[in-house]
């Protein structure tokens, strides 16, 4: 039964995300954090509330001045999408986790990659740091949570094993243990420092998609593809309440330090603020995020909330009003709009929108994870100046033509360009494949070999 639940949850998430990628064109609020070239998948806020970190599909993390909404520096070094970020107490270091199966330790002052930690055999979905800053934990799609000793340059520690892929991990407020959640719906408590299993906190009917712990209260919040958000009492290991209202899988949760304020977001494009009242009741405020929500984080004290999702932007909200925070001087980057006067290219233009998370048709590349497609036809693979190609593409003898592009989408990059960093994407429908190739041939333009 759990296998069925997991399959249904995965299909629901994939379908909703794909639909959103095709249809979404988000507008910018006045306090947006704009700088990523792909969907934002993770957020962390520093202990003093002055800085934020965001993780993106564009292979980078960005360190932000939260008050000014300006980029301090970009952390680049992963070979695939970055899913998760965390500050190390003290403010000098940060860690990130990626689809490339690694955890990275960064020096924030200069943006230097200090250590790349290997061991996961699947993508890294969640990272966390202990309250004393000496230990990090990472969760991955290899059914493990792995511990890393930050005081010895990230030396590997215990490996904690689940029966399913793991989507979330967090340290208990006193540092005595961990909580992790997996695709089977199980929420497991672990002892530290030995990493022994301390029992189940509980479970969801579907897979756990995210979890968070209050900083100064024994309260956890978890989210699931079953459309629920659940609050848990960590002292007695019991459910406090189940919060319902989302219309689709819930992808992200955050909880304020005192455990009384919770935020959740998901496929329905809504951020929901839940407040536990003194009488035991729960009040709710809804925020329209304009698209699926993949990441949430409160500032210290819970006065502001940072949310992000599929439209490349992180947004700052005032919790008291549920309205966009004001201020900042960030220049708004409007979404790229594909316009074609040829009705014969309309279907191809619609299909191309799913490619826009990674590619642009602008000559400058548009800060995307992949190289620009401007001048694609007749261009040798791996030849855009300044783009960091994988050796598989840099050394390839492929030239992009209508025929080779068609083969790429028919067979998939894992077959046609093995060893490259291209995300796994096939278009099995021959008619749709032909329409996309026709669009690219008509709009991207021909390569200038001069």
Image: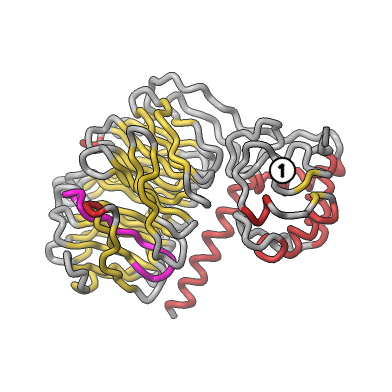
Residue picked out by circle 1: 383
Give the residue at x 60% y 42%: 24
Give the residue at x 14% y 60%: 176
Give the residue at x 73% y 65%: 411
Work out whether residue 392 or residue 99 is closer to the camera in this orientation and state it.
Answer: 392
Figure quadrant of residue 317: top left
Give the residue at x 41% y 25%: 70
| Farthest front residue in view | 395
Work out whether residue 246 or residue 304 is closer to the camera in this orientation and state it.
Answer: 304
In this rendering, the answer to whether 75 lies above or below 422 is above
Residue 284 visible to an observer of this rendering = no
In this rendering, the answer to whether 328 lies above or below 228 is above
Would residue 340 appear left or right of 186 to someone viewing this image?
A: right
Q: Position of residue 129 (x, y in %)?
A: 26, 51
Would residue 161 appear left or right of 134 to someone viewing this image?
A: right
Figure quadrant of residue 243: bottom left
Q: In what quadrant of the picture does the N terminus appear?
A: bottom left
In this rendering, the answer to whether 5 lies above or below 46 is below
Q: Magenta residues?
A: 131-144
Q: Verify whether residue 169 appears in magenta.
A: no
Colour basis:
secondary structure
């Amino acid at each position: 039964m759990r296998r069925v639940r997991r399959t249904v949850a995965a299909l629901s998430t994939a379908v909703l995300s794909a639909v959103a990628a095709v249809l979404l064109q988000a507008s910018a609020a006045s306090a947006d954090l704009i700088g990523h070239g792909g969907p934002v998948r993770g957020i962390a806020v520093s202990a003093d509330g002055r800085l934020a970190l965001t993780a993106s599909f564009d292979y980078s993390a960005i360190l932000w001045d939260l008050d000014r909404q300006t980029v301090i520096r970009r952390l680049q070094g992963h070979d695939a999408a970055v899913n998760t970020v965390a500050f190390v107490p003290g403010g000098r270091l940060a860690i990130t986790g990626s689809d490339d199966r690694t955890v990275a330790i960064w020096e924030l002052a200069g943006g230097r990659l200090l250590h790349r930690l290997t061991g996961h055999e699947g993508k890294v979905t969640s990272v966390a740091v202990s309250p004393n800053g000496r230990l990090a934990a990472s969760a991955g799609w290899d059914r493990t949570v792995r511990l890393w000793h930050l005081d010895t340059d990230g030396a590997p520690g215990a490996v904690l094993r689940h029966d399913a892929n793991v989507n979330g991990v967090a340290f208990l407020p006193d540092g005595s243990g961990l909580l992790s959640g997996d695709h089977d719906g199980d929420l497991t408590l672990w002892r530290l420092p030995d990493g022994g299993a301390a029992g189940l906190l509980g479970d969801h009917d579907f897979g756990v998609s995210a979890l968070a712990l209050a900083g100064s209260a024994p309260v956890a919040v978890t989210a699931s593809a079953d459309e629920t958000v659940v609050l848990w009492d960590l002292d007695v290991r019991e459910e406090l309440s189940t919060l319902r209202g989302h219309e689709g899988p819930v992808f992200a949760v955050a909880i304020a330090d005192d455990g009384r304020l919770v935020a959740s977001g998901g496929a329905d494009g809504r951020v929901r603020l839940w407040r536990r009242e003194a009488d035991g009741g729960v009040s709710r405020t809804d925020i329209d995020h304009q698209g699926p929500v993949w990441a949430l984080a409160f500032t210290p004290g819970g006065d502001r909330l940072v949310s992000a999702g599929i439209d490349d932007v992180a947004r700052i909200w005032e919790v008291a009003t549920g309205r966009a925070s004001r201020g900042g001087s960030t220049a708004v980057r409007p979404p790229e709009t594909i316009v074609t006067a040829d009705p014969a290219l309309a279907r191809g233009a619609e299909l191309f929108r799913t490619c826009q998370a990674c590619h642009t048709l602008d000559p400058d590349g548009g800060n995307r994870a992949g190289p620009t497609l401007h001048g694609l036809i007749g261009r040798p693979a791996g030849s855009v100046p300044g783009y960091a190609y994988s050796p598989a593409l840099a050394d390839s003898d492929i030239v992009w033509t209508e025929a080779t592009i068609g083969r790429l989408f028919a067979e998939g990059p894992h077959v046609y360009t093995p060893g490259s960093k291209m995300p796994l994407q096939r278009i099995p429908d021959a008619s749709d494949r032909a329409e996309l190739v026709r669009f690219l041939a008509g709009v991207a333009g021909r390569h200038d070999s001069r």
